[in-house]
Amino acid sequence: MSTPTLSIVIPAFNEGAYLPQYLPTVIKSLQMWEETTGERGEILVVDNASVDDTAEVAASLGARVVHEDVRNIGQVRNTGAEAARGQYLFFIDADVAVPVEGITTVMRLLVSGLHVGGAIPPLYTPKRLGARLLCRYWDAYRRRHRGAQGVDQFCTIAAFRTLGGYRTDWFMSEDVEFFARLRQLGDATRQPVVLVDELRVRPSTRRYDQWPTWRMVWWQNPITARLLPASATFWRHWYQSTVR
């Protein structure tokens, strides 16, 4: 079997119920790229000490399952990257739907050699007005700073290794911090990061819909995101209280 060109890394903690809804969108997008280019990709689901059937569901859908017991999202993504066999990496969360042309567009940009990486911006559609306003604030913040969240990010494996991957001493904002370093690398090498504004990925809004807006604002605000990213104690409820 030929070596894959692209490795898709999906961190997953107790996502057995959500993978059947979202992973098929990744598979369909990957298959479209494979069929039009003749290249091959792989999907790695990094099971982060789940206590449900995440690993079994991922395997049944065709993903290669990797295990990481340390409950730290940066470590989970890095473990997936270490197991990856492709020249290019696409990180996406387990509860995010990818547009069918997403992988094809991403790979066209990466293979061109003009960009070290980038992201497809997310489209959040929570039910409550307060949650929608919070999402709009962060959308504007990302556009202003040329930033991107870990809901999806892509890069060359060379860039990932140059940067040393995601920080494992942070429990929040490690994705934003990684993308900032990726952006700096791209500017320095004249291979700028690219935000694929003509497309959108669609993350689940389960936290926004099930948690009160004040609780989301408490967790998702610039002060806590910047001042307390390395506090395992402060972020333990975010890790332990994933809504289903």
Image (tube, helix red, strand yellow):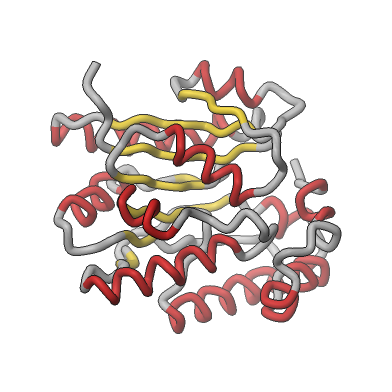
Relative vertical location of residue 16 with respect to residue 203 in this rendering, above or below: above
Relative vertical location of residue 43 with respect to residue 236 in this rendering, above or below: above
Pick whichever, 220 or 230, lies toward us.
Answer: 230
Relative vertical location of residue 32 with respect to residue 75 in this rendering, above or below: above
Instruction: Please identify the quarter of the rendering in which residue 89 is found.
Output: top left
Q: Give the residue displayed 64% in from the left and 76% down from the top.
A: 133
- The total of numbered circles placed on residues is 0
Check the picture and name the quadrant holding the N terminus. top left
Check the picture and name the quadrant holding the C terminus. top right
Pick whichever, 81 or 111, lies toward us.
Answer: 81
Q: Give the residue displayed 70% in from the left and 70% down from the top.
A: 220
Q: Give the residue displayed 82% in from the left and 72% down from the top.
A: 214
Q: Give the residue displayed 85% in from the left and 58% down from the top.
A: 233
Q: Position of residue 103 (x, y in %)?
A: 30, 45
Relative vertical location of residue 186 with respect to residue 158 in this rendering, above or below: below
Q: Position of residue 163 (x, y in %)?
A: 42, 60
In-image side of 50 versus 120 (left or right): right
Q: Position of residue 129 (x, y in %)?
A: 69, 72
Pick whichever, 69 or 133, lies toward us.
Answer: 69
